[in-house]
């Protein structure tokens, strides 16, 4: 059947033809299919290479089993020895925070510290005392007696004694400066 369009050229719908020719569509499908086949072949080759690498590493790992067992045995022995050494060190460790707290708790009024020195096996505390009733030495001795009577404090010391005491005038007041020496166990 023949169609006759009598509309003017400006209004007529123009026939553009098919958007995609069927030949191009066939080539596009073949190209996509070939691309998928190449990707699958590449992944298969990569998988085979990784499996081969895994097999080689497992062989090396199995050859190292005797060395690993020997190493595990020595690590177990050394960790037991290390834990014994660490336990001994912790037992010998001096808890200085507790010691300093005991110093402050046993400190009588009028006594203050100027310097605390700790060396390998010795302890030196330099302090001063002031008393308006002239009982400076009694305050120092009561401080030292309180420390010596505290068993928790004295367990790390073999000796704790006053080394020297000296009277000085500071600002019109008589002050006694003293040194307290201790030997650690």
Image (cartoon, rainbow, N blue to C red):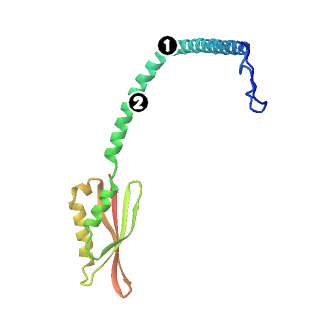
Q: Quadrant of residue 126?
A: bottom left
Instruction: Kindly give the residue lying farthest to the right in the view shown.
Output: 9
Q: Position of residue 168 (x, y in %)?
A: 37, 81
Q: Is residue 19 above or below residue 34?
A: below
Quarter occupied by the N terminus: top right
Q: Is residue 20 above or below residue 80?
A: above
| Front residue (pair 59, 158) | 59
Residue position for label 1: 62
Q: Position of residue 3 (x, y in %)?
A: 73, 18
Identify the residue at image location x=27%, y=81%.
131
| Front residue (pair 129, 50) | 50
Indicate which disc residue 91 carries. none
Q: Quadrant of residue 42?
A: top right
Q: Sequence-wise, which precedes: disc 1 or disc 2?
A: 1
Q: Position of residue 123 (x, y in %)?
A: 37, 60
Indicate which disc residue 78 carries. 2
Q: Quadrant of residue 177?
A: bottom left
| Front residue (pair 37, 28) | 28
Q: CA distance from mark 1 to mark 2?
A: 25 Å
Identify the residue at image location x=22%, y=56%.
151
Q: How many marks?
A: 2
- Is 108 positioned to the left or the right of 124 in the image? left
- Is 117 positioned to the left or the right of 11 in the image? left
Instruction: Kindly give the residue lying farthest to the bottom in the view shown.
Output: 172
Of tags 1 and 2, the one toward the viewer is 1
Q: Residues within 10 Å of mark 1 (few under 14, many from 20)?
A: few
| Front residue (pair 172, 167) | 172
Question: Under tag 2, what secondary structure?
Answer: helix
Q: Residues within 10 Å of mark 2 (few under 14, many from 20)?
A: few
Q: Position of residue 132 (x, y in %)?
A: 26, 84
């Amino acid at each position: 059947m023949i169609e006759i369009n009598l509309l003017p050229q400006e209004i007529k719908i123009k026939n553009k033809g098919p958007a995609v020719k069927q030949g191009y569509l066939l080539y596009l499908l073949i190209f996509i299919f070939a691309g998928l086949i190449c990707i699958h072949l590449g992944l298969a080759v990569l998988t085979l290479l990784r499996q081969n690498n895994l097999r080689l590493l497992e062989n090396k790992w199995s050859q190292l089993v005797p060395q690993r067992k020997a190493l595990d045995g020595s690590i177990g022995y050394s960790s037991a020895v290390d834990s014994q050494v660490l336990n001994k060190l912790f037992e010998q460790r001096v808890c200085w925070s507790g010691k300093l707290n005991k110093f402050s708790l046993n400190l009588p009024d009028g006594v203050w510290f100027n310097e605390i020195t700790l060396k390998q096996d010795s302890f030196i505390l330099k302090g001063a005392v002031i008393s308006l009733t002239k009982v400076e030495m009694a305050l120092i001795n009561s401080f030292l007696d309180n420390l010596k009577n505290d068993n928790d404090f004295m367990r790390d010391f073999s000796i704790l004694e006053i080394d020297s005491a000296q009277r000085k005038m500071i600002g019109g007041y008589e002050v006694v400066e003293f040194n307290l020496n201790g030997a650690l166990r």
